[in-house]
Image (cartoon, helix red, strand yellow):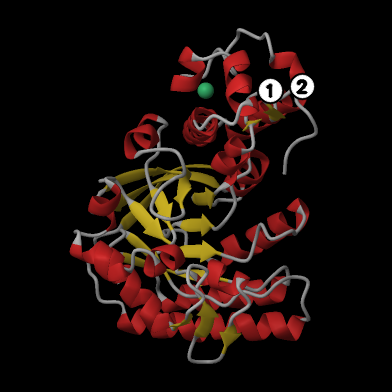
Amino acid sequence: MSEAVGFSVEHRDGVARTGMLSTPHGSVATPAFLPVGTRGTVRTLDSRDLAEAGTQIVLANTYHLMLRPGADVVESLGGLHAFMGWERPILTDSGGFQVFSLEPTVDEDGVVFRSAYDGSEVRLTPEQAVDIQERLGPDIAMVLDVLVGLPAPVETVRAAMQRTLRWAERALAVHTRSDQALFGIVQGGTDLDLRLESAAATAALGFGGFGIGGLSVGESAEERNTVLDAVVGELPEAKPRYVMGLGDTEGVLDAVERGCDLFDCVWPTRLARHGKVLSRLGDYSIRRAEFAGDGAPIDEECPCLTCRRYSRAYLRHLHATGEMLGPRLLSVHNLTFTLRVLAGCREAISSGGFLAYRSGLLAGRASGPSETPLR
Ligand SMILES: [Zn+2]
């Protein structure tokens, strides 16, 4: 295990906490949100945009990068930080989530799937997932886990969880890069017994941090929160907890309240490409007719480039005409909004006011001119 990536808890407010994740490429104040750079790019945004929005750490997808351009190419160009022009921390997923969405052939050795790029057959084992991520060179790598679509029979979920544990051991055994942390992943669906077993056993393996996987796949907020409560209770206090694939505002607030530290999601940027705005007053579509002559920015108080310089009418026009700048400007805003929510969480936890911050934010989002909350 790496000593180059460390974590310390700084303040507690109930179960919620702030912390500092230190990596060879700088520190990350937690709770923190990771914008998703699927193919080594957070769509429409360059690394300067990301930094200006307040990004501390980004996620890149191993599945996509191993196929295009390939780990060898990225390695030969100095690794992901140099390749992406992003000198701050990077986390890569293991590729598991994408691979399992392709309904691969799974056996104890690994998975076989067809490349979405050229249809060729590709095998991925827990050892190869580590090797690829060591060559890509992020600060944090993830083990290859086994995912099942829910609902599924409990025996199926148990078998996937137990195989994930065996794969986690194999991943740990071959991970050698001392300037990179390897995180384990807790699985077990919405079955609390399986979640508890998975969390305790994964914690016992001694990873530098822990992903909580298999959530944000259609379960209710109550189911997700129950799982988080159970899992967090089994994970070590002194290690970061990362809820994979969670990024909607209400969901992140729920998870922060439960002591989780890291979150990633395509949510803010994907919505932006569909003309959806995230805001203190709720989420809504910029395409609505009422904005056609609206000279005000999305949010007078938002410091982002989009809100400093452009009107809702202009943003609506860009989306109505299919201009590329439209998705880019909304991505800048939505990412800034999400990162500011996390910054607000950190500030509130530090001063013991997290629950007040949370209820104030939720009340504001419910009061505005928004449509039905987006999920
Ligand atoms: Zn803004």
The location of residue 248, given as percent across then percent down, is 63, 43
Question: Residue 281: which numbered mark, if any?
Answer: 1
Neighbour class for label 2 at 10 Å: few (<14), some, many (≥20)? few
- Report helix, strand or loop for mark 2: helix
Q: Is mark 1 within 8 Å of ligand 1?
A: no
State the image quarter where residue 286 is shown.
top right
The location of residue 271, given as percent across then percent down, is 62, 39
The location of residue 24, given as percent across then percent down, is 23, 54
* Above or below: residue 192 compared with residue 261: below
| Mark nearer the N terminus (1 vs 2) | 1
Total marks shown come to: 2
| Residue depicted at 50% across the width and 63% down the height | 211
- Judge whether residue 205 can be spotted in this image: yes
Q: Along the line of sight, which residue is nearer the eye, 343 or 310?
A: 310
Q: Quadrant of the N terminus?
A: bottom left
| Residue depicted at 54% across the width and 35% down the height | 338
Q: Are marks 1 and 2 in contact (CB under 8 Å)?
A: yes
| Residue depicted at 69% across the width and 15% down the height | 291
Q: Quadrant of the C terminus?
A: top right
Question: Residue 367: which numbered mark, if any?
Answer: 2
* Above or below: residue 165 compared with residue 303: below
